[in-house]
Image (cartoon, rainbow, N blue to C red):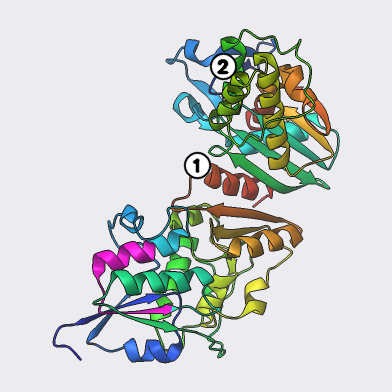
């Protein structure tokens, strides 16, 4: 059975019969003639026999991977951020921000390329910019660079601002489980004002597994 | 009474005494809170900020388009403070329309059997909003066992209601509306802690505070606000919440 999480920047595919780990394919390189069995993600309905809501997939992925009955799981993607909160094994709250918190992951990726930065080598700054969304937040970087701050410092403050915004959106948990592509970004993870456990990019794929059984 | 059929707009739930007066064959009543055909909401933007309650923006757009002869607008505690300012705007932009500010503090209970019956939630909500114009005692509907709850005002976009099961019970201001007691804080704050409940408010409405507060107190509640239309993320939240709650 072919499962897929169709993200804005990357598609994640898992063939459950192959025994192989999931594959990561840049969305722009994805063969659009392919049909999968079960999908999630904002492009998923176009390519799948069965579609699972992204929040449902995130929650089920979290339930499968996290061995606690109370947890907050935040998914930071290219285009949007979403979270689920479980309390004593029951869904307590959830949120999906596709407007005001939009394009955070995508903007971070663009900035890394534009300024040729390596996020594994940047230190977490002491302060941050106040960021509400990726696009609007960029003006802080331009202003800081004009006033003499280094590009790397300015981008690091931007990334920290995004992490704090995402943390607030997820209702400021003490411990946060994180999923999505930004799990590979140590600057982003280090910028949260709470402990963070990275679950990687494939949590939503994991959340499709119950539908495959 | 003019020779032509008079058009009377209502905003909120006017007092029963007013509705009795309006129940006259020479008068057509129009609920200005609800979208009336293809009226462009943007026509309200020169008069109300875009970042404002979607229902009151709808009131302005409807009023500009339909130009009622008279508008009864509840500006009391049974509606909201924003309605007071909307009434001022209406008085200014519709000089040929009589704007009547009223305060509905009726306390006679009409019953809430629609809120508790088994019925498609869109139909149920439509029946409740239509019943505002009916001054007669409402027909009693058989109650059903609730599997989910919807708390709040009738949304600007009813499509979000289609995601709920027909065994959803209605709470909040909509229940006060069916009961014809819109200023009933005790009824408005009531919820059933045993069923998963979505606490809904229109974005930019003062009731967002109460919706969030009650959702936090409810052992299994989800707060949700939407502006003019229910976007994919709002619908996904409802769908996931109900699915993950075993509804």
Q: From what the image shows, is residue B33 above or below residue B196?
A: below
Q: Position of residue A136 (x, y in %)?
A: 54, 32
Q: Is residue B5 visible?
A: yes
Q: From what the image shows, is residue A17 above or below residue A37?
A: above
Label drawn at residue B232: 1
Q: Residue at x 56, y 77 (%)?
A: B176
Q: From what the image shows, is residue A79 above or below residue A1?
A: below
Q: Is residue A201 visible?
A: no
Q: Nearer the viewer, mark 1 or mark 2?
A: 2
Separation (CA) of disc 1 from disc 2: 26 Å
Asked if the residue at tag 2 contacts the one at tag 1, i.e. Cβ–Cβ closer than 8 Å, the answer is: no
Q: Are marks 1 and 2 on the same chain?
A: no
In the foreground, A35 or B94: B94
Instruction: Give residue A144's quadrant in the image.
Output: top right
Q: Is residue B130 magenta?
A: no
**The residue stretch that appears in magenta:** B58-73
Q: Is residue B63 magenta?
A: yes
Label drawn at residue A110: 2
Q: From what the image shows, is residue B84 above or below residue B232?
A: below
Q: Residue at x 68, y 22 (%)?
A: A182
Q: Is residue B14 left or right of residue A24?
A: left
Q: Position of residue B216 (x, y in %)?
A: 73, 58
Q: Position of residue B227 (x, y in %)?
A: 48, 53
Q: Which element carries disc 2, helix, strand or loop?
A: helix
- Which part of the image, by quadrant, shows the N terminus of chain B? bottom left
Q: Which element carries disc 1, helix, strand or loop?
A: helix
């Amino acid at each position: 059975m072919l499962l897929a999480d169709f993200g804005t920047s990357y598609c994640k595919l898992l063939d459950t019969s192959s025994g192989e780990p999931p594959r990561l394919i840049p969305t722009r390189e994805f063969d659009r003639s392919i049909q999968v069995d079960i999908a999630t993600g904002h492009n998923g309905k176009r390519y799948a026999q069965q579609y699972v809501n992204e929040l449902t997939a995130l929650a089920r992925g979290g339930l499968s991977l996290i061995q606690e009955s109370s947890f907050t799981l935040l998914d930071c993607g290219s285009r949007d951020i979403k979270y689920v909160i479980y309390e004593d094994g029951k869904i307590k709250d959830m949120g999906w921000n596709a407007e005001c918190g939009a394009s955070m992951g995508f903007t971070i990726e663009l900035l890394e390329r534009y300024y040729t930065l390596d996020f594994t080598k940047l230190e977490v700054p002491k302060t941050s910019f106040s960021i509400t969304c990726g696009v609007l937040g960029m003006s802080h970087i331009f202003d800081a660079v004009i006033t003499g701050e280094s590009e790397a410092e300015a981008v690091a403050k931007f990334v920290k601002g995004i992490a704090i915004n995402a943390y607030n959106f997820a209702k400021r948990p003490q411990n946060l489980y994180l999923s999505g592509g930004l799990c590979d970004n140590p600057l982003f993870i280090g910028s949260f004002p709470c402990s963070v456990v990275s679950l990687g990019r494939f949590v939503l794929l994991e959340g499709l597994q119950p539908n495959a059984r | 009474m003019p020779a032509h059929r008079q058009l009377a707009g209502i905003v909120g739930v006017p007092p029963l005494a007013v509705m009795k007066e309006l129940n006259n064959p020479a008068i057509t009543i129009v609920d200005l809170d609800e979208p009336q055909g293809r009226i462009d909401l943007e026509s309200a933007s020169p008069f109300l900020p875009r970042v404002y309650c979607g229902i009151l923006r709808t009131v302005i757009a409807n009023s500009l388009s339909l130009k009622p002869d008279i508008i009864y607008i509840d500006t009391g505690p049974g509606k909201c403070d924003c309605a007071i300012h909307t009434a001022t705007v209406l008085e200014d932009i519709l000089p040929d329309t009589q704007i009547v500010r009223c305060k509905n503090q009726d306390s006679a209970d009409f019953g809430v059997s629609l809120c508790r019956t088994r019925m498609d939630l869109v139909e149920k909500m439509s029946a409740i909003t239509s019943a505002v114009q009916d001054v007669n005692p409402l027909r009693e509907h058989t109650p059903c066992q609730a599997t989910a709850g919807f708390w709040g005002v009738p949304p600007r976009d009813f499509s979000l209601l289609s995601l709920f099961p027909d065994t959803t019970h209605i709470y909040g201001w909509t229940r006060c509306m069916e009961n014809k007691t819109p200023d009933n804080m005790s009824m408005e704050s009531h919820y059933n802690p045993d069923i998963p409940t979505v606490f809904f408010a229109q974005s930019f409405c003062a009731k967002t505070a109460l919706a969030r507060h009650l959702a936090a107190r409810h052992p299994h509640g989800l707060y949700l606000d939407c502006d003019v239309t229910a976007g994919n993320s709002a619908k996904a939240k409802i769908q996931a919440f109900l699915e993950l709650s075993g509804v």
